[in-house]
Amino acid sequence: GTHGVKLWNAQTGEFRGEVSGPQEYGPRWTEISFLPDGGTLVGAAEGCEVFFWDVVNGAFERTLKVGRSGFVAFSPDGTVLASADRDGTVKLWDLTLQADLDTLRGHNKIVNGIAFSPDSRRLVSTSFYGAPVKMWDVASGHDLTSALGNPTRNTATCVDLSADGNILAIGTGDLELW
């Protein structure tokens, strides 16, 4: 079988084609997402890499080596990629410069969920162990977790912020809203 990402026309259901990374690479995709420009598709792979494609012509553009867990999130403004790592860190990447911006430290173990606020200024991360939920200022890298109070003591498995940024949803086995 192939290891690409298949594309369909969402209006007609017509198959548009498939994009894939370098031929020697056969990743299992952990996440795919369109950048806000709508023409760039990004796929995160188990092998610690993120692939970028131009979906208009199906051309592979580039690869970025990121953290080892495969969880990624893109800022809504399309300028920053956050990648979770098994070592308890979250790395921030400047997508324009393709450069490492910052490493956020505060979790004890694997970071398994990350989400940006709608204004791209804050990032929330979750971990299975210890300090399960953290909130960060993206520009400065400062830990803003104290602003959350203590949203959960449970193991957090996923996280997201509402479209207005006012509600934090935390998956803990039960869904918690904060």
Image (cartoon, helix red, strand yellow):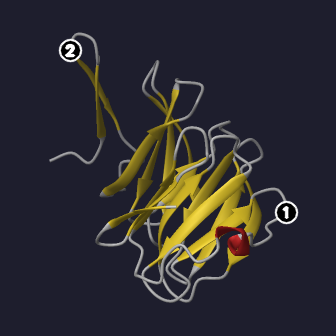
The residue that label 1 is drawn on is 140
Q: Residues within 10 Å of mark 1 (few under 14, many from 20)?
A: few
**In the drawing, does residue 24 fall left or right of residue 130?**
left
Tag 2: amino acid: Glu
Quarter location, residue 33: top left
- What residue is rendered at 36% in x and 72% in y? 172
Q: Nearer the viewer, mark 1 or mark 2?
A: 1
Q: As drawn, which residue projects farthest toward the left?
A: 1
Q: Is residue 154 above or below residue 141?
A: below
Helix, strand or loop under label 2:
loop
Depth check: give the residue in front, 178 or 102.
178
Q: Is residue 93 above or below residue 77?
A: below
Q: Which mark is residue 14?
A: 2
Q: Which mark is residue 63?
A: none
Depth check: give the residue in front, 69 or 166.
166
Q: Position of residue 142 (x, y in %)?
A: 80, 70
Q: Is residue 94 visible?
A: yes
Q: Is residue 76 above or below residue 24?
A: above
